[in-house]
Image (cartoon, helix red, strand yellow):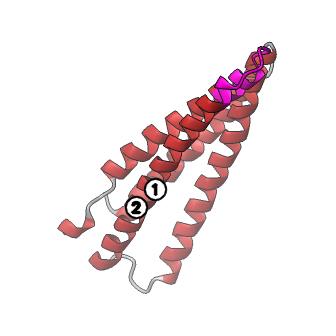
Amino acid sequence: MNIWQFQNKLTQRLLWWGAGSMVVGLFLLRGNAFWKAVGWQFVGWGFVDALIALFGRASMNQRLEALENPGLPEVHARESENLRRLLWLNAFLDILYVMGGKAWADRDRGDGRRAATGLGIALQGLFLLIFDVFHAMECPDETAR
C-alpha cells in the first residue's frame, strides 16, 4: 500500500469514527444528566474528528493535484515522513486530552457533570491516542523503496 492509499484509508477510518461517535453521543443524550454530559462530548468530538478527516482528505487531494508526479519515490518518502510526524504529535496531544479529561473529572462538585464531561474527554482522547499510535506505526516506510 502506498502513502496515498494509506492516507485515504486513515481519513476514511477517522470519518467513520467521527460519525459513530456522534451517533453514540446522540443516543447517550437520551439518558440521565451524567450520560447526557458524556453524550455531548461524543457528539462534539465526533463532529471535530469528522471535520478533520474531511479536511485531511481534501488536503491530500490538493497535494496530489498540485504535484507533477505524485508517484515518485521521494514524494512518497516525504509524504510518509510528514504524516508519521503529524500522527506522533497528535498522539502526544491525545495524552494531554486524557490527562485533561481526568483532571476535569477530578474537579467534580458532586453532581456528576464534571465527572461525566471528563470521562467523555478522556474516552475520546484514549481512542485518538490508540488510533494515532497505530497509524503512526503502520504508516508505510517509503524510504525502503
Q: Is residue 100 above or below residue 77?
A: above
Q: Residue furthest left?
A: 144
Residue 52 appears in which quarter of the rendering? bottom right
**Foreground of the two, 36 or 143:** 36
The quadrant in which residue 84 appears is bottom left
Q: Which residue is situated farthest in the bottom direction here?
A: 68
| Observer able to see residue 38 | no
In magenta, the rendered stretch is: 104-118
- Quarter of the image with the N terminus in it: bottom left
Q: Amino acid at mark 1?
A: Leu
Q: Is residue 26 left or right of residue 16?
A: right
Q: Secondary structure at mark 1?
A: helix
Could you say which is closer to the camera, residue 132 or residue 62? 132
**Magenta span contains residue 105:** yes
Q: Which mark is residue 113?
A: none
Which SS class for mark 2?
A: helix
Q: Position of residue 79 (x, y in %)?
A: 39, 69
Query: Do the residues bearing badges 2 and 1 touch, measured as CB atoms within 8 Å?
Result: yes
- Residue 13 position in % (x across, y down): 51, 44
Structural distance between the alpha carbons of marks 2 and 1: 6 Å
Q: Residue type at mark 2?
A: Arg
Residue under label 1: 89
Q: Is residue 25 visible?
A: yes
Residue 49 within the segment the image draws in magenta: no
Task: Give the overall secondary structure of the magenta segment.
Answer: helix
Residue at the spot of label 2: 85
User: Of 99 and 22, which appears nearest the observer?
Assistant: 99
Looking at the rendered image, the quarter that the C terminus falls into is bottom left
Q: Quadrant of residue 61?
A: bottom right
